[in-house]
């Protein structure tokens, strides 16, 4: 990948730019780290946002196929657990590549 | 001998029938492996408690790398006398194996204690923030179980032993 300001702008279309909001990015990054999946309540507690905001962000990412939901039973309680899909994992990789390009350009200057 | 061989032998000793594809099984493996390691098992996994309770990314990688068949049949590590004594201690707190919130509370409390937070009030406050879904009852019970698990015979001073004997004698009279 050629590293210049033009490439930074051009490469911003390689991923879904609607996923770059703090909450959506955090959900994707957390689910990338916790490969076992995260319970709804764990996501809610860590993001510290309302149920409405969390549900709409999860639905958005789910509709794009970036995450899947599984219902599990723990101690007779039904809980939703979220996992990243392969598509979601690839999207995270694209975001990382773009961010790395931005870091290199900003730190080293346009050479 | 790999860390994961020790994990498998320990889980088998505890009599846990686990399936990697099952979320609940993976949940149990993470928490039990953390407790076992905190009590002295030399598995050397790095754990974090934030978001999902004691959780190791390396351990996750290890069990996702194993096929279900290998997981069930592998038994390369011969547990030592010390290992079984430690696992017996976990077995004695058997309700933590069947009550997930209690297991989560106990393992998180052990983590906090290992991090140097020893004051009970401070621990309760921290658990309430980290794990708002865990009931107060389970936090208190988790605190008791954590203390039981971390207790070593050498902590038993002459005074404490006499106090325990006195309590035992009163209980026997009843």
Image (spheres, coloured by chain):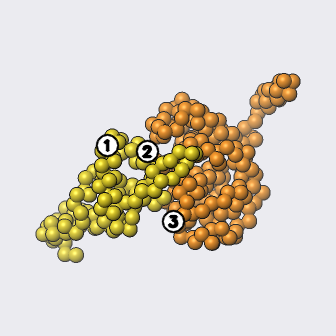
- Residue at the (42%, 48%) spot, across then down: A40
Disc 3: host chain: B
Q: Are marks 1 and 3 in contact (CB under 8 Å)?
A: no
Q: Are marks 2 and 3 on the same chain?
A: no
- Look at the image and give the colour of chain A: yellow
Is residue B16 visible from the viewing direction of this image?
Answer: yes
Q: Position of residue A107 (x, y in %)?
A: 22, 62
Q: Which residue in the structure is indicated by mark 3?
A: B61
Decide which of A9, B21 is in the foreground and name it. B21
Image quarter of the N terminus of chain B:
bottom right
Q: Is residue B144 left or right of residue A19?
A: right
Q: Residue furthest left?
A: A6
Circle 3: element type? helix
Chain represented in orange: B
Q: Is residue B128 found left or right of B15 in the rendered image?
A: left
Q: Check disc 1 and report the residue beneath it.
A: A52
């Amino acid at each position: 990948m050629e590293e210049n300001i033009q490439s930074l702008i051009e490469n911003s279309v390689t991923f879904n730019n609607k996923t770059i909001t703090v909450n959506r990015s955090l959900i994707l990054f957390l689910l990338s780290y916790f490969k076992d999946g995260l319970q709804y309540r764990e996501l809610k507690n860590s993001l510290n946002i309302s149920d409405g905001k969390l549900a709409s962000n999860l639905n958005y990412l789910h509709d794009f196929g970036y995450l899947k939901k599984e219902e599990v039973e723990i101690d007779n309680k039904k809980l939703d657990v979220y996992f990243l899909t392969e598509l979601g994992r690839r999207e995270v990789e694209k975001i990382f590549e773009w961010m790395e390009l931005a870091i290199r350009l900003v730190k080293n200057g346009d050479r | 001998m790999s860390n994961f061989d020790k994990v498998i032998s320990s889980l088998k000793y505890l009599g846990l029938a686990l399936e990697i594809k099952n979320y609940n099984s993976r949940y149990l493996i993470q928490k039990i492996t953390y407790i076992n390691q905190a009590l002295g098992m030399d598995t050397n996994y790095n754990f974090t408690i934030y978001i999902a309770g004691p959780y190791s990314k390396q351990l996750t990688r290890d069990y996702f790398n194993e096929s279900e068949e290998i997981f069930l049949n592998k038994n390369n590590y011969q547990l030592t006398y010390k290992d079984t004594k430690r696992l017996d201690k976990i077995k004695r707190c058997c309700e933590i194996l069947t009550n997930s919130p209690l297991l989560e509370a106990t393992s998180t409390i052990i983590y906090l204690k290992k991090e140097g937070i020893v004051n009970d009030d401070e621990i309760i406050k921290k658990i309430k923030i980290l794990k708002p879904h865990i009931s107060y009852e389970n936090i208190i019970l988790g605190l008791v179980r954590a203390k039981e698990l971390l207790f070593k015979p050498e902590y038993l001073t002459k005074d404490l032993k006499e106090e325990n004997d006195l309590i035992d004698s009163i209980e026997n009279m009843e």
